[in-house]
Amino acid sequence: MMQEYEKILNQKYEEVYNELEKEVHSDLPFRIYHYTGASFLQSIIKHKLGEKAKLWFTKWNFLNDFSELRYIHEVVDNNLHILNDKTPELYKFLKEINGIDRALKNDTTFLRYSARENYILSFSLEPDLLNMWTYYTKSAQNDGYSIGFDTSELVRSINNANHITVQCGYVIYDEKEQERIIQKMLSELQEMYIMLMDNSDEIKYIRWMISNCFEDYINLLACYFKHPAFKEEKEIRLVYENVQNTMWEKVREKNGLFIPYVELDYDVESIEEVWISPTLQDKHAAYGLNILGEQYGINWSINQSKIPFRNI
């Protein structure tokens, strides 16, 4: 039978996780935009009669590069000092398991008891940003499109079609806000650690429990933390947290790596508009989009980028 303090500890774990979710989750904005290339645009809206189109949510630690994973661990490392005076042994332990090399290698020194896995689809609040065209349109000429979704309809259709709950959150770029949230998380871990030390003499169990809580909390916050240098992207993310392990991962190749993702059904009716990149200033682009929309039953408005044309 589970000891009473273990029940309390598990309850505390869930309370802290829920508190951190409130810190990063937000109300749905009116409209969000996904920047992509032509072939990906077609794959996003393509569906057979009687079936739904699919969106790909990428596993959180396989996003565009490993800089985001590295960044969250750097923020944590810069704030671990708040533990040193009261619990120096906890400071030392978290300093060790927070090592970026270990994180990048997906080191599983401690067996995981949590089944939480986060998958992300990224959007912007703006439809026509130069840096987004440059980075996300996936072609040498930066030709591409930004797809404007009715956010409420998109989330509703994903949740209903897949019987899940997708969360929405603005990416947090502000360093002070990131530090505040990280320090809140570390303080809660410190409370758990003290409770364990008072009730258990099993150091292996204590380390196992703390490491699992720490990794779950970090994995959640990493979905929404990004370096301030990227703030002009005005990014917002939809996050699917798979806690039941009922959906099989697939993989796709990108730059020689195989990237894990899950496919989620959605209604293409949630698409309201599409923007054409600055480098595609040709009447044929709009004409082709009209035909494409008609083919898949999408009544979208078509907009040309307002950014002056040049080879960006």
Image (cartoon, rainbow, N blue to C red):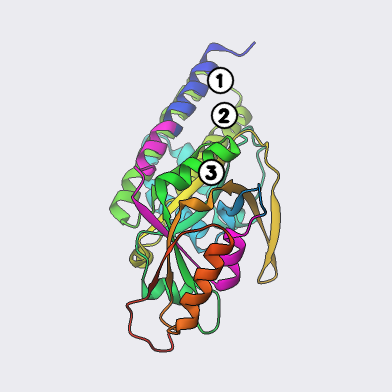
- Is 39 a magenta residue? yes
Q: Does the magenta run of residues contain 34?
A: yes
**Furthest-left residue in this view:** 176
First along the sequence among labels 2 and 3? 3
The residue tagged with tag 2: helix, strand or loop? helix
* Highlighted magenta segment, given as a residue range: 18-47
Secondary structure of the residue carrying numbered label 1 = loop
**Can you see residue 93?**
no
Label for residue 200?
1
Residue drawn at x 41%, y 44% as measured from the top left: 152
x 70%, y 57%: residue: 251
Residue 225: image location, x then y, percent? 41, 53
Residue 167 visible in this rendered orientation of the protein = yes
* 110 sits to left or right of 269: right
Q: Which residue is drawn at 53% across and 12% down?
A: 4
**Horizontal side of residue 303 vs 137, given as left or right:** left
Task: Give the camera-side residue of 309 and 61.
Answer: 309
Instruction: Name the kind of residue labelled 3 in the image.
Output: Ile
Tell me the amino acid under the disc marked 1: Ser
The image shows residue 35 at horizontal and vertical percentages of 47, 66
- Residue 120 in picture, x, y percent from top left: 53, 51
Disc 3 to disc 1, how far (Cα)? 44 Å
